[in-house]
Image: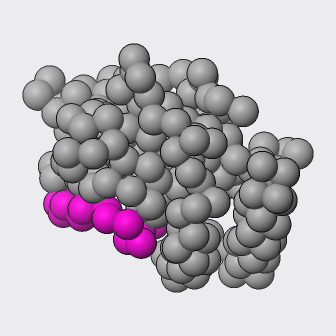
Amino acid sequence: MMQARHQVDGAVAQAVDRIRAIERDHGVTRDSLEEIKSTLIGLARHPELFSESAYPCPATEDSLIYLISEDDDHRIALYLSTGIPGRTSPPHNHTTWAVIVGIDGEEENRLYERVDDGSVPGRGEIRETKRIVLRPGDGIALMPEDIHSIHVVSRVPTRHLHMYGLSIEHLPNRIEFDMKKGTYKVFPPSSGIRK
């Protein structure tokens, strides 16, 4: 087991170093996030590093998130996220860049654009613009203001790598949207992350 842990640590450290350099050298742009996505896809091509035995899918919850790597200042944070079939999230933003790459299962990411001008607190109208299904080896890159929702569409649980510019435990101003009501609310930083 120690050998496997060293393999994970080494592979993750190399990928994180590369991602850190991309962000440092090129900033946060759609192009730089595509480079980050390519790096993360390379890491996801080794699913044995993120085995079910090391990162089990939830038994009683609809999802579990495992912290794999995080810089001391909470930046450049990598997680393994698992979700059971049928799991969904409301449309939300991240307030930091995000890259998601599939390892197992299929997850539909729905992308949205905001159609109101944001001038009325609590009011947030959005419309769906695109759907992208992430399968093993596929990825999506999101800018801080991008809005998406996730929907596990496979009959098997999903296991995906999620990389954020700032850890999700330290994002206090994320918002989620209620499309039916045309509203939004701020939701607290994520908790319950397995370490």
Above or below: residue 154 compared with residue 85: below
Left-right relation of 35 to 154? right
Q: Nearer the viewer, residue 21 or 15?
A: 15
Residue 132: say if magenta.
yes
Left-right relation of 180 to 165? left
Residue 80: say if magenta.
no
Residue 169 x, y percent position in the rendering = 65, 31
Residue extending farthest left = 180
Classify residue 151 by image quadrant: top left
Residue 195 x, y percent position in the rendering = 72, 33
The answer to whether any part of residue 36 appears in the image is no
Which residue is found at the position 45% from the left and 35% from the top?
Answer: 57
Q: Nearer the viewer, residue 168 or 50?
A: 50
The answer to whether any part of residue 181 appears in the image is yes
Considering the whole magenta stretch, tell me its main secondary structure: strand
Which residue is found at the position 65% from the left and 29% from the top?
Answer: 194
Residue extending farthest front = 1
Classify residue 46 by image quadrant: bottom right
Which residue is found at the position 65% from the left and 52% from the top?
Answer: 78
Task: Report the span colored magenta.
Answer: 129-142
Which residue is found at the position 52% from the left and 45% from the top?
Answer: 52
Here the colouring is one colour
